[in-house]
Image (cartoon, rainbow, N blue to C red):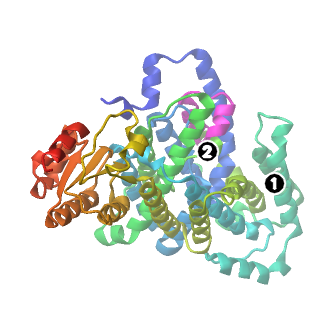
């Protein structure tokens, strides 16, 4: 089997893992499991689903991603990035629609991995990632205003503008106790670990706020008051009913889940690699992520991916193998089985405070500010993705962001293509030929092309060569520095040859190796140019040109 499709855990077990490493992984897994509990519950509630679905996702996806993934330290589970997509799907298609979309997304992600597209997802522009991540952070922040201030609005609109309009209409309902709990949660979550590093501030905030609310009977909303009991068992697995009409209606959100999940998981893997000096297997990671989403859906969970914050927590606490991720999931399973009845007592304002901190860390405002000082196209992609995410939805934002990024790439690549005209009068001035002793005959024009001849640059190439005012007998097109030619490039080349042939001008191609010749044959280049006019080096091309004088 190809090494890139072998799970990292399998390779590490084959090499052998020391007892010391296993001990550190178990301790790290315990800590990360405790950190993941409030986040799993908070992400589920913010996504518009019941809290146990977040825990189920963290358990099922956590085990599969760690056991079969391509990273040593990746921690999988529900993340803040999915809140926007999941909430939108639930509002439009219901819980069953979310389950089917997650199930479909899992197969799409596996397909990306099997097609070895893992490395390509890394090339999505940073400005696009920061744009939709910052947009998601703002949406998460705005979605928590109701619980943070204890407004008790029964139905908060999904639309960003409508949501804030409703908030302002209900400012008279602010609950001071809720604000105190939420504000205290934010402070404890941000600063507690400066006092005691091994204990997560979010867990301390949950324990303190829950105890205070129950002991003093403080009138604030809790998980129980809004969602009822939290089951202390996993639901039985069941396959969703999928038909053509359902697939058609959910294919777009399924692709959005797949793309976002793939990007975030690989981004998390890259970040963790830099922290431990490792190297993950991108395609195996995608396959594991896909499997995790399939089984999460089967067990009634929500979309999952690699969680950057929890992965970083794992690394900082000594986790170095996938054992830590498996332990983290088992810790969550134990908590669900033993302590679920107590989790229902957690105040929603406390979870809102935790998510406010998550939104702050997701906002990447420093990177946002830095990009705004940079390239104009990066700024356009950043702001477009950001505002589309906030005002419309993440699916549209990703689609348009990728289209804009593609245009930016094409523009930059076309600008990188250089077409230089050389005649017998200026050949001695050309730096390209400093190491060559070339004699360009009269009535021969030489063009040197540097860069890929693809659809983004083909028109520029065609216009540059066609707009010569000279009337030579022979034109040599030197292509030694052309790494690739696509269908549009070949079409432009054919049109140039035809137009010059109509004028009685011979066209000779130089720098064409055997591999390129095979591509010429596939693209029917020999239908417009005889093979005798195609040469591997410039000297042979010049000799041919001299024969026409």
Residue at 56%, 58% (x, y): give it. Answer: 128
In front: 325, or 356?
A: 356
Instruction: From the viewer's perspective, tell me whether residue 191 is left or right of residue 106.
Output: right
Mark 2 or mark 1, which has the lower sequence index?
1
Where's residue 139, x and y in %? 66, 66
Name the residue carrying label 2. 308
Which region of the structure is painted magenta? 311-333
Label 1 sits on a secondary structure element that is helix
In three-dimensional space, the C-alpha distance between marks 2 and 1, rounded to whole angstroms, equals 20 Å
Q: Residue furthest bottom?
A: 169
Residue 212 against residue 227 in the figure, above or below: above
Does the magenta segment cover residue 323?
Answer: yes
Where's residue 212, x and y in %? 86, 54
Residue at 57%, 43% (x, y): give it. Answer: 268
Where's residue 144, x and y in %? 72, 66
> How many residues crowd mark 1 within 10 Å: few (<14), some (14–19), many (20+)?
many
The mark closer to the camera, 2 or 1, is 2
Residue 302 against residue 22 in the figure, above or below: below
In front: 168, or 483?
A: 483
Name the residue carrying label 1. 186
Q: Quadrant of residue 543?
A: top left
Instruction: From the viewer's perspective, tell me whether residue 212 is left or right of residue 71.
Output: right
Q: Quadrant of residue 35?
A: top right
Where's residue 197, x and y in %? 79, 34
């Amino acid at each position: 089997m190809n090494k890139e499709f072998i799970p990292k855990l399998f390779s590490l077990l084959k090499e052998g893992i020391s007892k010391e490493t296993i001990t550190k992984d178990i301790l790290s897994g315990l800590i990360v499991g405790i950190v993941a509990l409030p986040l799993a519950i908070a992400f589920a509630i913010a996504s518009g689903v019941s809290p146990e679905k977040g825990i189920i996702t963290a358990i099922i996806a956590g085990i599969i991603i760690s056991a079969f993934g391509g990273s040593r330290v990746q921690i999988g589970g529900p993340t803040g990035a999915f809140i926007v997509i999941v909430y939108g799907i639930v509002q439009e298609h219901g819980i069953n629609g979310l389950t089917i979309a997650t199930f479909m997304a899992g197969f799409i992600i596996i397909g990306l991995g099997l097609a070895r597209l893992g490395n390509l997802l890394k090339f999505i522009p940073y400005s696009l990632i920061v744009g939709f991540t910052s947009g998601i952070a703002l949406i998460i922040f705005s979605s928590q205003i109701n619980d943070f201030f204890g407004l008790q609005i029964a139905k908060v609109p999904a639309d960003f503008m409508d949501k804030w309009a409703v908030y302002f209409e209900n400012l008279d309902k602010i609950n001071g106790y809720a604000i105190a709990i939420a504000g205290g949660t934010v402070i404890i979550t941000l600063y507690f670990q400066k006092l005691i590093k091994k204990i997560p501030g979010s867990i301390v905030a949950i324990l303190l706020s829950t105890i205070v609310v129950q002991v003093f009977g403080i009138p604030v909303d809790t998980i129980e008051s809004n969602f009822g009991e939290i089951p202390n068992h996993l639901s039985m697995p069941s396959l969703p009913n999928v038909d053509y009409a359902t697939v058609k209606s959910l294919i777009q959100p399924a692709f959005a889940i797949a793309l976002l999940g793939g990007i975030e998981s690989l981004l998390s893997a890259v970040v963790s690699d830099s922290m431990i000096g490792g190297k993950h297997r991108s395609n195996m990671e995608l396959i594991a992520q896909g499997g995790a989403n399939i089984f999460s859906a089967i067990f009634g969970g929500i979309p999952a991916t690699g969680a950057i914050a929890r992965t970083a927590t794992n690394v900082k606490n000594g986790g170095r193998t996938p054992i830590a991720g498996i332990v983290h999931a088992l810790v969550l399973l134990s908590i669900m089985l033993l302590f679920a009845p107590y989790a229902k007592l957690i105040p929603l304002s406390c979870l809102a405070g935790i998510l406010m901190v998550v939104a702050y860390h997701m906002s990447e405002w420093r990177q946002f500010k830095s990009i705004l000082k940079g390239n104009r196209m990066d700024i356009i992609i950043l702001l477009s993705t950001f505002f589309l995410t906030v005002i419309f939805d993440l699916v549209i934002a990703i689609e348009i962001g990728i289209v804009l990024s593609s245009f930016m790439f094409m523009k930059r690549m076309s600008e990188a293509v250089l077409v230089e005209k050389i005649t017998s009068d200026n050949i001695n001035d050309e730096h390209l030929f400093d190491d060559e002793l070339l004699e360009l005959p009269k009535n021969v024009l030489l063009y040197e092309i540097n860069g890929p001849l693809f659809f983004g640059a083909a028109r520029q190439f065609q216009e540059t060569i066609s707009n010569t005012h000279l009337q030579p007998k022979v034109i040599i097109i030197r292509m030694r520095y052309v790494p690739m030619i696509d269908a549009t490039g070949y079409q432009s080349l054919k049109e140039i040859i035809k137009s010059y042939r109509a004028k009685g001008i011979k066209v000779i191609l130089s720098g064409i190796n055997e591999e390129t010749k095979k591509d010429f044959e596939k693209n029917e280049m020999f239908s417009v140019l005889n093979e005798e006019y195609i040469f591997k080096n410039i000297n042979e091309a010049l000799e041919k040109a001299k024969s026409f004088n």
